[in-house]
Image: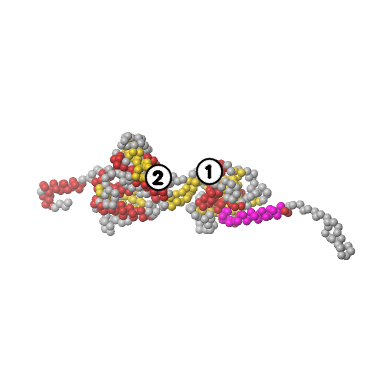
Amino acid sequence: MLMSKQDFSNPEGIQRAIRAAKEFLRPPPDLTPAEWAETNIKIPLGNAIPGYIRFDNAPYQREPLDLFADPSVERITLMWGAQLGKTQLINCAIGFFIEHDPSSQLMMQPSQGDLHTWLETKLNPMVDANPVLNDRIAKPRSREGVNNQAMKSYPGGFLMFAWSGSPRTMRGRSAPKIYCDEVDGYEYTAEGHPVNLLWQRAATFGDQRKLFVTSTPTIKGSSFVEKSHTSGDMRKFWLTCPHCEERIVLEWKAIIWQKGEDGEHDPSTAMYYCQECGAGIDDAQKRAMLRTGEWVAEREFKGHASYHLSELYSPFRRWRDIVQSFLEKKHSGDIQSFVNVSLAETYEEEGEAIDDHALSARREPFDGKIPEEVVILTAGVDVQGDRLEVSIIGWGRDDESYVISHDVLYGDPSTPSTWTALDSLLFATYETHSGRQLAIRASCIDSGGHNTKAVYDYSKRNYARRVFAVKGMGGEGKPVSGRPSKNNIGRCPLFPVGVDTIKELLFARMRIVGEGAGYIHFSDQLSDEYFRQLTAEQIVVKFHRGFQKRTFKKMRPRNEALDCFVYAVAAQAILNINVNSLASRLDSVQNQQNEDEKPVAKAAKKPFVPRMGGRTGGFAKNW
């Protein structure tokens, strides 16, 4: 309020000036983020419960939001199901640090489309519905500040936006308050995971920085929010049973429903049954239980508060709604989405694995020789930091194969001596039981891991001897081998190899139990460790955007034997030799040799028969 000189000429004017100064200098009320939100944030129309936000409707939201003002907390993780208010908490926190405790902030979404959706359907409507925020944020296209799709400024700070698929939106940006929504949808960059990159860039803010991570989880073992959750104190929301007054955590297995007279599932009969007393709990009792719920940590708090919450806790979802959702997902074969989105749990894929013990029991004595059925030999080489691993595979008719040997050549692959040792295996002559001499027709060496330049150099030197550098290409439907390219630092012919395609082929052949087409024979010189490595991966089925996708997942850390077999198969494919035709030619040669080696029988003497009607002395010359 502006004061004139006359106002200060009388006692009443002076008192008004003093009151105005006090009002201007009055510190903001000491409110927690949840209290501030309930006082200032009005939820726009179109939401489940429009009007001023009331955390009594969803009491589990209050504590995580209040931790934003707790100086002892630097990281908050919500591994929550859908429609539980994760994004609403982010919006309330953003509003708190715009109006009540101004501070710079950064919001990240999985994609540009997700960011646009959040801005247009969540943040902007909230700002428009709340004058306390609308008055603080700069107006679009004004000279007072910035307000666009990349940033919004306000007195005391700014709110920046980024998405994980664009490293450009992350470079040069940092803020003490960071929100990462739906992190399991983020794409890794060449520099690492986007969440870790943003958190590292905020290190200069010291104790002021806070990281808020939210997401529904995805696949067990690869879910980022699951890893973030388990690195915190792992809090669960405990409720009190209205019947026995024991404390319980809501679990999916405690919901039971009946079948109708037609034998079909009837979701309307769904009821939650207390794990302690077995009494039924209906939807109204659940809402009452939520009001007295309490977050309890399973681990010691060390600056990271992490929360797990399933859709079972939602006051807006009845038991029958959740059961109906489960039955629909089960019927469509998309049970993973129910596990991830409703239960907020990671989905553990069912894998197709091979029993290493069953394979190792099939070892045969080769007696130090190549089995006679082998027509050609190929080799696969895997390069590690301190060694080369080499498998030699024999090939017979109808893709029947023979694992002759698997050798480990220890030594630094960047030194010539290691590759000299490889020469002694790849360029040696091998002998069958009959004495037939065999050389390795082709070899493939992995160039995608360690010492790529050394692999390129070795392959170029020995390309005429069919030593090929290869690079694995993952994914379904890739060809076993493609055309080589020299578009690499070594200007070396580099063959792309469909590793997942070959693994599918090998896993199918490993399941064949009778000798013949496709069967794999194993030398008795192979160790138990070889079979553990050969079966170190399993086929898993993932759901991606509603479609099934088969991929390979490691069960054990070492899989070099499997990789070597894959490269040996690729070498056979690159050779493109008709093994059956070659085997037939060898059989013909062998049969001819056998005929030639038979002793020649002496011709029997024929009886003397005079030629009638001929000249005197005209007897037959052939006796």
Q: Nearer the viewer, residue 476 or 48?
A: 48
Residue 355: image tag: 1
Q: Main secondary structure of the magenta part?
A: helix
**Residue 143 located within the stretch drawn in magenta:** no
Residue closest to the far left: 10
Left or right? Give the position of 440 relative to 211: right
Marks 2 & 1, CB-CB < 8 Å contact: no
Q: Nearer the viewer, residue 319 or 541?
A: 319
Q: Earlier in the sequence, mark 2 or mark 1?
A: 2
Q: Position of residue 600 (x, y in %)?
A: 77, 53
Q: Which quadrant of the figure contains the C terminus? A: bottom right
Mark 1 packing: few (<14 Cα in 10 Å), some, or many (20+)? some
Q: Helix or strand or loop: what does disc 1 sit on?
A: loop
Q: Position of residue 331 (x, y in %)?
A: 41, 49
Left or right? Give the position of 495 relative to 230: right
Q: Nearer the viewer, residue 341 or 610?
A: 610
Q: Nearer the viewer, residue 317 or 290?
A: 317
Q: Helix or strand or loop: what does disc 2 sit on?
A: loop
- Range of the magenta residues? 571-594
Residue ID at (56%, 47%): 512
Q: Please state which amino acid type lies under the numbered disc 2.
A: Gly
Residue on which disc 2 sits = 263
Q: Position of residue 501 (x, y in %)?
A: 51, 52
Q: Is residue 156 visible?
A: no
Q: Please state which amino acid type lies under the numbered disc 1.
A: Asp
Mark 2 or 1, closer to the camera: 2
